[in-house]
Image (cartoon, rainbow, N blue to C red):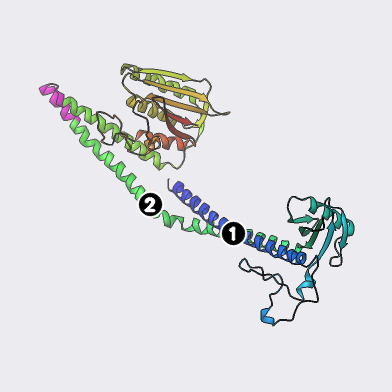
Amino acid sequence: MEKKIKKKFIAVATISIFTVLLIVLGIIDLISVANVRKEVFSVLKYIADNSGTIPYDTVEEDDEDDRKPFLTDLSLFEKEFSITQEGKYEVRYFTAISDESGIVKSLDMNHIAAVSHSDAAVYTVQAVLSPVSRDIIRKGTSHYAYLRRKLKSGGYMVIFMDCSRQVSTVYATVKFSLYIGLACMILFFIIVNIFAGYAMAPIINNMESQKQFITNASHELKTPLAVIRANTEVMEMVEGKSEWTESTKKQIQRMTELISQLITLSKLQEKDAVKLVEVDFTKEAKEVAGDFKTVVENDGKHFAANIAEGVKCHADEKGLHELISILLDNAAKYCDEEGEVSVTLVKHGKQGGILTVANSYKEGEGINYEKFFERFYREDSSHNQESKKGYGIGLSMAQNLTEMFRGRIGAKYNNGMIYFIVTL
């Protein structure tokens, strides 16, 4: 049980830090991409606004403090774009003038060397026919950003700029963030594994104390119950049976059953795992159904069983028998007067089965059935013993057994029937 709690704590903590890192690093990467795109398209717009070229001889020599260095002025909070005199020579670009279909009329290739005239013509056609007026495209190992602008005289002006350096910077940032995130995850996982025991120690100690108390109290209660039973039987021998002695024996029986279930539940929680083997699900279901059929019918209720042949599952044989018994016992106790109890088993996958135990329950509409698996939960909050025959432990035990078998258990209500479904 301690290992199980520790694993859950580590899993939750790891998932939490992973989510935080994913969000933080993701935001950083998105901002990097957004800034680079803004940088690139600001340069392209600057060129387009100057008729497809960068003017080299019209920049005034302002004071050094007033200049904005090239490609570092594109903060998300900047409103204006400018370029330094030296920065102009770093931009590698070409400009194409084309008609509506993308056929090139003129090319200005004076500011780029890595692109041939034929490639420039192909890029221009792609940009003109593209549904977006600006984008970044990849050609081999290089990346080019383009900006398409409609001309008043007809046709288009398309400016292409080599942005491989900027894109490489983004890739490096993303790659670096992934490495940082992975290193943080590994470091965090190691730290959590080291200190998880210390963090969970108070909870584990509290649970162990509770289990020890239940076990000790259960054993201590057996002796006075045995004495009360013996005294009651002596009274019946001397004075004869009466409604008082019958009532006392009935309560003794209830207490004995409750103690037995508490001990069983405590033992189940002490097991971290059981050895799962192939079990004949059909055989166990038929045996338990046969035992409960007489009990249910003698109580004036209807019993129906539909159990498929050859159903196997991986479980513990005794535990599976106990699981089916708990569900059928619960159905028999809580079934409406003259109602129906049914058990169904069908195959699930290549090696598994779905067990469904149902009973009539007219007052079951609008109830949260997930709470039925909480320990000591009873739908009747008054805990009236006459109206409810259980203790609120059985379904909790059924859930523990199902989890030990690595299966699922759930409950639902439909047309006056409550269904408990176990998938193994």
Range of residues picked out in magenta: 229-244
Q: Is residue 303 above or below residue 320?
A: above
Residue 142's x, y, as percent?
79, 59
Q: Residue at x 35, y 20 (%)?
A: 339
User: Between residues 33 and 373, which one lies in front from this camera angle?
Assistant: 33
SS state under label 1: helix
Q: Is residue 109 magenta?
A: no
Q: Amino acid under label 1?
A: Ile
Q: Position of residue 46 (x, y in %)?
A: 74, 67
Mark identifier at residue 203:
2
Q: Quadrant of the N terminus?
A: top left
Q: Quadrant of residue 247?
A: top left
- Residue situated furthest left in the rendering: 239
Q: Residue flagged by tag 2: what amino acid is it?
A: Ile
Furthest-front residue in view? 153
Residue at mark 1 to residue at mark 2: CA–CA distance: 37 Å
Q: Looking at the rendering, which quadrant does residue 388 occupy?
A: top left
Mark 1 surroundings within 10 Å by alpha-carbon count, few (fewer than 14), some (14 through 19), many (20 or more): few
Residue 238, magenta (yes or no): yes
Nearer to the camera, 5 or 177: 177
Residue 315 lies left or right of residue 325; in this view the side is right
Magenta-drawn stretch, dominant element (helix, strand or loop): helix
For disc 1, the marked residue is 27
Direction from residue 149 to residue 353 in the image, left or right: left
Marks 1/2 in contact by CB < 8 Å: the verdict is no
SS at badge 2:
helix
Q: Quadrant of residue 88?
A: bottom right
**Place of residue 159 in the rendered image (x, y in percent of width and height, measured from the top left):** 79, 61
74 lies above or below 156 = below
Q: Nearer the viewer, residue 128 or 393?
A: 128
